[in-house]
Amino acid sequence: MMALAWATSPSPVNLRFGSRTTTSATPLVKKQRSSVSVHRLVGRGRALAEAAPAATCDEQRRQQTEDMLLRLDEDGWVEEHMLSLLTPVAEAWQPADLLPTFAATADEHRSQVSELQARAAGVPDELLVCLVGNMVTEEALPTGRVDMPQVERTVHHLIARGMRMSDPSCAYRGFVYGAFQERATFVSHARTARLAARHGDACLARICGAVAADERRHEAAYTRAVARCIEGEPDAVVRALAAVMRDKVTMPGELMTDGRDGDLFAHFSAVAQRAGVYTAADYGDMVEHFVRRWGVAELVGGLSSEGRRAQDYVCGLPRKIRRMEELAHNRAARMEARSVSFSWLFDRPVLLH
Ligand SMILES: [Fe+2]
């Protein structure tokens, strides 16, 4: 997910991995000598750091970004641990592999389109909302039941609006944010795939499953980068992790609008929560997962007093998130059922709670 949003974001470390999603953003790394890759990374890091607001980006910060990127690639680490995640172009999946083809005769094409529409007929509206919300930062996943011009308008609005990100001039925050966001995207696409299969659309399930597999590899890339950085700079990385958590990990689609619904992202999120595609509980699980994966609780040496405070805060966060989620769940249970019309679905109403 998120290639379009990332392409417009001021992230200092705009690494892209995978097949489909690499195409929209500028690919920074190629399967070549890692020294070439790291020079491109450093060059991009420097350019973005220079473009960041003066208040958040000083010489020291720029130097930190460059040093971090150079250290990351020591002993060919980038080539071995990150570039190895790239799928060879010949093996990458393509939408044309899964959708009706214009290369067929008119009759064959008509029958392929009718089959697609028949498969999509059983997919409930709430799942279509999740599908569209997931894909506005991806490329189109047609089902034959959504208002594609409205979906495309939403994509254009989002490109124009961009995204918010916690201090984009800090490279460590960029990696931490990437890991969280890619994992959230993986979860959403994988659940959408499972639900599409349950409602009888095996082709849609395969498409969402292929996207989910890409997101899994994006997550692995950012997760490994943070793990590598934390070995050398535990204090700076743990403080960056706490800062990202305090700012909340907002999705790149947060500023989406279709030009009509000013709360479109909130409405999409409510439908995703209700459908079980992405929930508040998932956020708590993710924080717990990364705290464990990066060994945050086990860090003993190399932490300043601020670093230790950040460590305590992050390690206690999953419990706090679960408590808040329980309260929100109880509140929602007392609320009256409410639905909202989605222009993506030709203004059909969908239950929020
Ligand atoms: Fe991704």
Image (cartoon, rainbow, N blue to C red):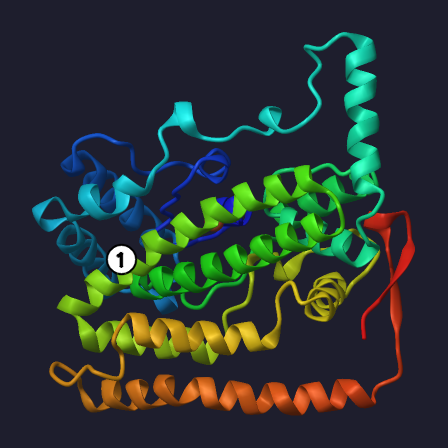
Callout 1 amino acid: Ala
Determine the residue positioned at 37% across, 34% down.
87
Q: Is residue 12 visible?
A: no
Give 191 or 138, whichever is nearer the viewer: 191
Give 3 or 211, whichever is nearer the viewer: 211
Q: Is residue 203 visible?
A: yes
Return the residue found at the far top.
Answer: 105
Residue 273 location (% of width, % of height): 69, 70
Residue 154 location (% of width, % of height): 72, 47
Residue 240 position (above or below residue 312) = above
- Left or right of 135: which side holds 64? left
Determine the residue positioned at 84% across, 41% down.
145
Q: Quick one: quadrant of the C terminus?
A: bottom right
Determine the residue positioned at 27% across, 58% down.
224
Q: Secondary structure at mark 1?
A: helix
Image-quadrant location for residue 86: top left
Residue 330 location (% of width, % of height): 72, 91
Q: How many marks?
A: 1
Is the distance from the Cβ of mark 1 to the nearest ligand 1 atom less than 8 Å? no
Residue 325 position (above or below residue 270) = below
Residue 214 location (% of width, % of height): 46, 44
- Left or right of 138: which side holds 111? right
Residue 320 position (above or below residue 179) = below
Give 118 or 241, whichever is nearer the viewer: 118
Few, some or many residues within 10 Å of mark 1 (<14, 14–19, 20+): many
Determine the residue positioned at 30% across, 70% down.
293
Which residue is denoted by mark 1 in the rendering?
A: 225
